[in-house]
Amino acid sequence: MDEIDDQSETGCCPRFYPDPWDEKEITFEDKLFLKDHVTSIFHIPLNFGRVMTRSMKKIEDTGTLAPDPLVLSDENSLWGSDVYISVNEEILGAKMEKISGTFLTKVFEGPYKSMGKWMKEMENYVRTKGKELKKMYFYYTTCPKCAKFYGKNYVVIFAEV
């Protein structure tokens, strides 16, 4: 986490710059992630901070944080989501996942309550590119406190095509 702290005005999340992420096509080939699970009620996370603290401790203890950290969330249920944190090597005793595929990305800004609208916009964006949507992952670029500090709450949707 020191790597992130060095780039941050808040001592937590670095400032997010949307241009490198907006309306891009990104391909992952066996991109390695530490996988964890967050409990939710109607997609509202109950233990996200605790899960991130636990996962980041494993990553810090092993020195395996990827050079350009990426945290993806798979909102796969009303009652929970899987969280994927990019790492540069396997961590013994941790649940690991390799993700491969081609993704279209689009950056959204605003309150989380706009998520349903953003998902529909993303579906339309994928259609305009002549692609078929397989799955969506969400990259919450900053924690709520940092989003408030920076005055922007960005979310990048990764649409697997």
Image (spheres, helix red, strand yellow):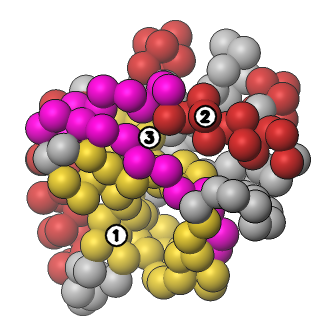
Q: Secondary structure at mark 3?
A: strand
The residue at the point 60 percent across, 34 percent down is 54
Label of residue 54 in the image: 2
The residue at the point 62 percent across, 84 percent down is 29
Separation (CA) of disc 2 from disc 1: 27 Å
Label of residue 140 in the image: 3
Predominant SS along the magenta part = strand
Measured from the top left, where is residue 31 in percent x and y?
64, 74
Measured from the top left, where is residue 53 in percent x and y?
60, 29
Instruction: Indicate the amino acid at tag 3.
Output: Tyr
Judging depth in this view, the residue of 16 and 82 nearest the camera is: 82
Quarter of the image where the C terminus is located: bottom left
Label of residue 159 in the image: 1
Closer to the chain start, of discs 3 and 2, is: 2
Q: Secondary structure at mark 1?
A: strand
- Judge from the rendering whether residue 87 lies leftward or rightward of residue 146; answer left or right: right
Name of the residue lying farthest toward the front: 93
Separation (CA) of disc 3 from disc 2: 18 Å
Measured from the top left, where is residue 119 in percent x and y?
19, 55
Instruction: Indicate the amino acid at tag 2.
Output: Arg
Measured from the top left, where is residue 79 in percent x and y?
18, 44
- Judge from the rendering whether residue 154 lies leftward or rightward of residue 35; answer left or right: left
Judging depth in this view, the residue of 82 and 104 nearest the camera is: 82
Q: What segment carries the magenta color?
A: 31-50
Q: Nearer the viewer, mark 3 or mark 2?
A: 2
The residue at the point 54 percent across, 49 percent down is 71
Vertical relation: 82 (above or below) 23: above
